[in-house]
Image (cartoon, rainbow, N blue to C red):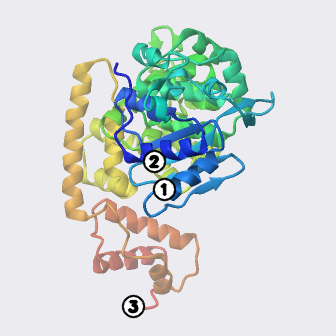
Amino acid sequence: MKTPQLPDLPLFRTIAEAAGELQYPAYVIGGYVRDLALERQSKDVDVVCVGDGIQLAQAVGKRLPNRPRVTVFKNFGTAMLPTPEIELEFVGARKESYRAESRKPEVEPGTLEEDLARRDFTINSLGLSLNPDDFGALVDRYDGMGDLQRRIIRTPLDPDITFSDDPLRMMRAVRFATQLNFDIEPDTYDAIARNKDRIKIVSQERITVELNKIIMAPKPSYGFKLLFQSGLLQLIFPKMAQLHGVEKVGQHAHKDNFYHTLQVLDNVVAAGGDLWLRWAAILHDIAKPATKRYDKRVGWTFHGHEDKGARWVPNIFTDLKLPLGEEMRQVQKLVRLHLRPIALVKEIVTDSAVRRLLFEAGEDIDRLMLLCRADITSKDHQRVARYLRNFDVVEQKLKEVEEKDHLRNFKPVITGEIIMSTFNLTPSRTVGELKEALLEAILDGKVRNEYGEAFALLLELGQRKGLTAAQA
């Protein structure tokens, strides 16, 4: 692996000049240097100086064209400086001490060595000098380059102290291992298992940020396996951990729904699914443990797990501090409907069934079909191929019915207001029953969603209920 080199940007020379004038030794340290070594793109640069980081940021800002605005965070002793090439953050070298009940450190000025020692992992403690006498020289006190070469995540100091001081670093270890496809060094991993209960002092918002970064990695199943095996998952997301395990009665055994879920998640990732489709993959079978029953004739069943899982989604999003708006509703819909296309595969695909699916899925029909394809994880490759061919038939039918009936954003032309004015009704169960009967007739193909046909049927339905139309 090549030693990281500072890009040939005038900006770095400008920082060096300002630091030299202030007599503050300065370094680029952290993720930017790591990513240079890994040849990954990165635009966030952390500059550490042995001195006042805010003062250095202001001095740099004055030297740059157009004098960009420096944003100062006095409480944290940091300053942000945006430039066209990169985002700069300046901070003075510091040392930290922690109290047992908090992950927020007491901070005071420190040496470069003390600043490097407080870093979470060796691969994030690499630095490049911005000083005139050794400009661009690598700073590597903890063999971070060796760990990059070995592809391992390791703490600079005793991992028990590192994780006890700031338990969020345990989540970050799993996140970096997942994003970079690295191993967690054995002593470091064992310390995660020993200190897992410390995660309870970390805010849920911080945990969920790391969890989402794991989910957005190229192969998130790896991260979830690390979380489960270390015991962290049982603490931060117990419902998912409860999917693990196989129960057997006689010759009947169900599949391990934890590992099945991880396979579905990876399949969704491979198909290009975004964060919320990935969450739908994670939650699609979340209620299987709660609905598991044993039937002597057919073995294990999970009847209704899709409906119960959908009902759980709002509380899960609330607990995990995920957004409760359209993103949650989309995941809830996908969880509720994830068995419907599979049912169509097993049956003769009728226009009526397709209309209902299009109506209920709406704009999410393509995402639903992607999830359903990802949900086929049998080890029987011929069976998988057969199901996928059947899905091709269903998708073709969906396309044909959609082109004909335009049901993706379907709204019945006969509204509740029209029903009430037609029969002089107030809001009531009767109005709801008439709306439902009209909807069913349209979805069954008995009438088109066209005003004349639908209104004629409304009059007929009202007559059956003994209603008299106000406008005959």
**Which of disc 1 and disc 2 is earlier in sequence?**
2
Where on the picture, by quarter, is residue 203?
A: top right
How many residues crowd around disc 1 within 10 Å: few (fewer than 14), some, or many (20 or more)?
some
Q: Position of residue 123 (x, y in %)?
A: 50, 23
Name the quarter where the C terminus is drawn.
Answer: bottom left
Read off the residue under disc 2.
14
Q: Which residue is mark 3?
A: 472
Q: Which mark is residue 77?
A: none
Pick whichever, 369 or 299, lies toward us. Answer: 369
The residue that appears at 19% across and 34% down in the rendered structure is 389
| Amino acid type indicated by mark 1 | Arg
Q: Is residue 323 visible?
A: no
Nearest to the observer: residue 30 or residue 48: 48
Q: Secondary structure at mark 1?
A: helix
**Depth check, front residue: 317 or 17:** 17
| Residue 464 pos. (x, y %) | 44, 73
**Which quarter of the figure is the N terminus placed in?**
top left
Question: Is 293 left, or right, of 462 in this rendering?
Answer: right
Residue type, mark 3 in image: Ala
Q: Who comes first in sequence, dot 3 or dot 2?
A: 2
What distance separates the C-alpha of mark 2 from that of mark 1? 7 Å
* Labels 3 & 1 near each other (Cβ < 8 A): no
What residue is rendered at 24% in x and 20% in y? 381
Horizontal relation, residue 448 to residue 461: left or right: left
Q: Residue at x 36, y 32 (%)?
A: 375
Relative to residue 420, is residue 86 drawn left or right? left
The residue where tag 1 is placed is: 63
Q: Disc 2, disc 1: CB below 8 Å? A: yes
Which sits earlier in the primary sequence, circle 3 or circle 1?
Answer: 1
**Measured from the top left, where is residue 88 in percent x and y?**
50, 47
Q: Secondary structure at mark 2?
A: helix
Q: In the rendered structure, are the residues bearing label 3 and label 2 in contact, judged by CB atoms less than 8 Å apart?
A: no
